[in-house]
Amino acid sequence: MARHKIGIVGIGKISQDQHIPVIRKNRAFDLVAVASTRGLTVEGVPHAFRNQTEMLEGVPDIDAIAICTPPQVRHAIAREILAAGKHVLLEKPPAATLSELTDLADYARERGLVLFTTWHSQYNEGVEKAREYLAPRTVTSLDIQWKEDVRKWHPGQEWIWDAGSFGVFDPGINGLSVATRIMPSPLFITKAELFFPENRDAPIAANLDFRIGDVTTNCRAEFDWRETGDEKWEMTVGTSDGSILKLTRGGRMLTIDGEVVVDGASEEYEGIYERFDELLNRREAHVDEQPFRLVADAFMSGRRITVEPFTE
Amino acid sequence: MARHKIGIVGIGKISQDQHIPVIRKNRAFDLVAVASTRGLTVEGVPHAFRNQTEMLEGVPDIDAIAICTPPQVRHAIAREILAAGKHVLLEKPPAATLSELTDLADYARERGLVLFTTWHSQYNEGVEKAREYLAPRTVTSLDIQWKEDVRKWHPGQEWIWDAGSFGVFDPGINGLSVATRIMPSPLFITKAELFFPENRDAPIAANLDFRIGDVTTNCRAEFDWRETGDEKWEMTVGTSDGSILKLTRGGRMLTIDGEVVVDGASEEYEGIYERFDELLNRREAHVDEQPFRLVADAFMSGRRITVEPFTE
């Protein structure tokens, strides 16, 4: 297979920390261009542009573009890239709204192009092993704890509190993306509580109750940005044969009945680009709406509770 | 074609006012059973049960069931009916959450069964004529006004204020179902404001801004349950050739450039059951998620504004 010529639109922290070094390590890809509205360039990448329009004109034989901008502008950018006949990878969350994501999925399908929604937490080895373990079993309980210190993870980012920025669901959606991946039956939200600081337009914490298959009790998630100290990104799953599965460190570590099954270094983005290579070679789309849909369901059905003001 | 043996689960106001009389008038259907948890019976309908389980056992050759219960319990009921190999019609809104609706659509598709999500306002003649008129045109503006007096339309119904009951989106979704039906390109919410009474868990009013195709200005909706006097269920659409289309009375009346094109009596449910007959004969599903997805998008991206308490 020829190497895929790829570009990146949006040169923020996640591009610099993950996409750029990981693409460079992967021999299936050639990183040929970047685009940054702030005019950033990346050493060793032959082309730098202001936006996707310039990129598509400047490198007409590009194969695929990864979109790492804020979610609010992704739909228009992805539409333009797909219209030019190029494949698209979307950072999480894939769009600003579900209608935008559905539209992109339909548009890519009509044109026979690859659209790939990435949920990075799904690419931990522990997650795959958990999925395999649970597949033939019946889940009887789920407890997701996704808690971190917003001051540590989003210092000075005032926009995270804007309406439409999802608030604590920004980390929480990682937990949901792991849960939807490993559960042998679909999750439904039966009750949600959203905690909004008095002075903010996005929730700082959320409690969700789920129904999973016929199981209506003991399935829950707690998201909290008010955690101090170390982050807690973990979930515990009980099954009908009495075993207890535990994923910790965002999916990096898996124990079953107290025994360590996986204790791996994080290779999330390596897994993402291996998968993207596969999808491009097969010209197959991979659009996973489930985590995003659960967030929308939580907002739609959730009770809003006002809590004390948040200041950084 | 043999007549379709049909049952109704949920004997509330909408069943009594619409489904029962309309099914009886339609010669393609035989209304063979009803189910009511309150034990209601309907004169002239041979079987009455407590729930769908009894109905499926009691009338094993039933072809299809219309679900007219509150949305919170629809998913489990529909799952059970589909599992029994029977077709399903869903009153609006089709489920409590998007995840539930997607699950039903997938489940029906896997089994080759008909699932029909009904949005009654779409079945006005004015709506179909508006759709035909706009199809070859470019829309340049949209103004949806969906306002009614909650005290008049929901007297004593305290549950409409529960979280998860959608509030003013209960009527508003009718406007959205008309707009998504007549627009030649998809609608996306770009901004939403949700007005919650201080003492309630559901919005009493909402303002939405849309993007339609490339048009990002002058596209909006205003929903309000605080309207006094007559209800206002209307929308005005401007097109690039300068014409102005106006749908009023929930889609029953259509004027184009001031000239009356349709001024019809409401035959919404007649249209729904004609369509259901077609779908059953073709064994074809019709799942329209768009109006529901826009409501979820509004809740997910909307800013919450507290307004004065509401008491009936």
Image: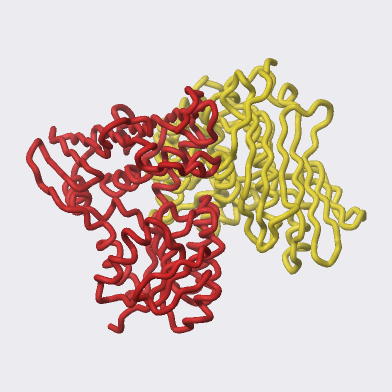
Chain colours: A yellow, B red
Across and down, in percent, residue A126 comes to 79, 52
Across and down, in percent, residue A24 comes to 66, 39
Residue positioned 15% across, 35% down in the render: B244
**Residue A220, relative to residue A130: is it above or below?**
above
Foreground residue, B118 or B60?
Answer: B60
Foreground residue, A248 or A243?
Answer: A243
Q: Locate residue B45 relative to residue A189 in the image: left or right.
A: left
How many marks overall?
A: 0
| Residue furthest out toward the right | A259
Residue positioned 29% across, 66% down in the render: B21
Image-quadrant location for residue A286: bottom right
Across and down, in percent, residue B220 comes to 33, 31
Location of the N terminus of chain A (image quadrant): bottom right
Image-quadrant location for residue B249: top left
Residue A27 visible in the current orientation:
no
Foreground residue, A77 or B195?
Answer: B195
Residue positioned 19% across, 42% down in the render: B137
Across and down, in percent, residue B122 comes to 28, 52
Residue B34 visible in the current orientation:
yes
| Residue furthest out toward the left | B259
Location of the C terminus of chain A (image quadrant): top right
Residue positioned 16% across, 44% down in the render: B254
Q: Locate residue A108 relative to residue B174 in the image: left or right.
A: right
